[in-house]
Image (cartoon, grey):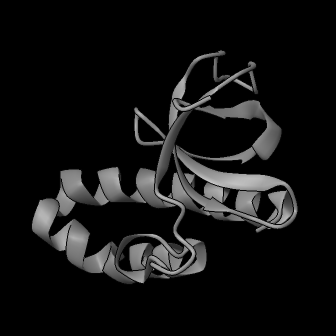
Amino acid sequence: MDKIIFNIIKKYHEIENELYFKLEKELGVNKADELLGKFVDYREQQLKIGKYLDENKNLNKDGFLNNKIEELERYTRVHVIYEYDNGLSLCETTAGFLKLVPNDLISYDTE
């Protein structure tokens, strides 16, 4: 996963969320879920998360940031989902946000 593709997916997710809340207000939760289900499914498929999680490549490790990156402060706890060959890791913050983080900015509890 590279940063360009990740940022495209991230922007797509922001638009998806905006649409969801508008639909939820107009049509209710069930209908909004139904209408956006394929969008959510496609995003999860591209990121290989949710039901598309690749168990063989899933790192499934908890760590923390050893330096600030973008809006995330040093010592922010992260769950590392995948570690890519390009030096980046797909992480989820405790707030549920997905971030692409350089591997060298992640420390693990065992270090």
Give me the residue at 47% from left, 73% from top.
44
Q: Look at the image and tell me in which quarter the N terminus lies.
A: bottom right
Given residues 84 and 1, the one toward you in this image is 84
Given residues 54 and 37, the one toward you in this image is 54
Instruction: Work out whether 7 lies above or below 67.
Output: below
Q: Quadrant of residue 3?
A: bottom right
Whether residue 19 sits left or right of residue 43 in the image: it is left
Q: Position of residue 31 (x, y in %)?
A: 16, 72
Given residues 38 and 98, the one toward you in this image is 98
Given residues 93 and 60, the one toward you in this image is 60
Q: Position of residue 58 (x, y in %)?
A: 52, 68
Instruction: Work out whether 111 lies above or below 19.
Output: above
Give me the residue at 54% from left, 35% from top.
63
Q: Quadrant of residue 34?
A: bottom left
Q: Position of residue 16 (x, y in %)?
A: 47, 61
Whether residue 23 sits left or right of residue 52 in the image: it is left
Whether residue 68 sits left or right of residue 98 in the image: it is right
Q: Look at the image and tell me in which quarter the C terminus lies.
A: top right
Q: Position of residue 24 (x, y in %)?
A: 22, 56
Whether residue 57 sits left or right of residue 30 in the image: it is right
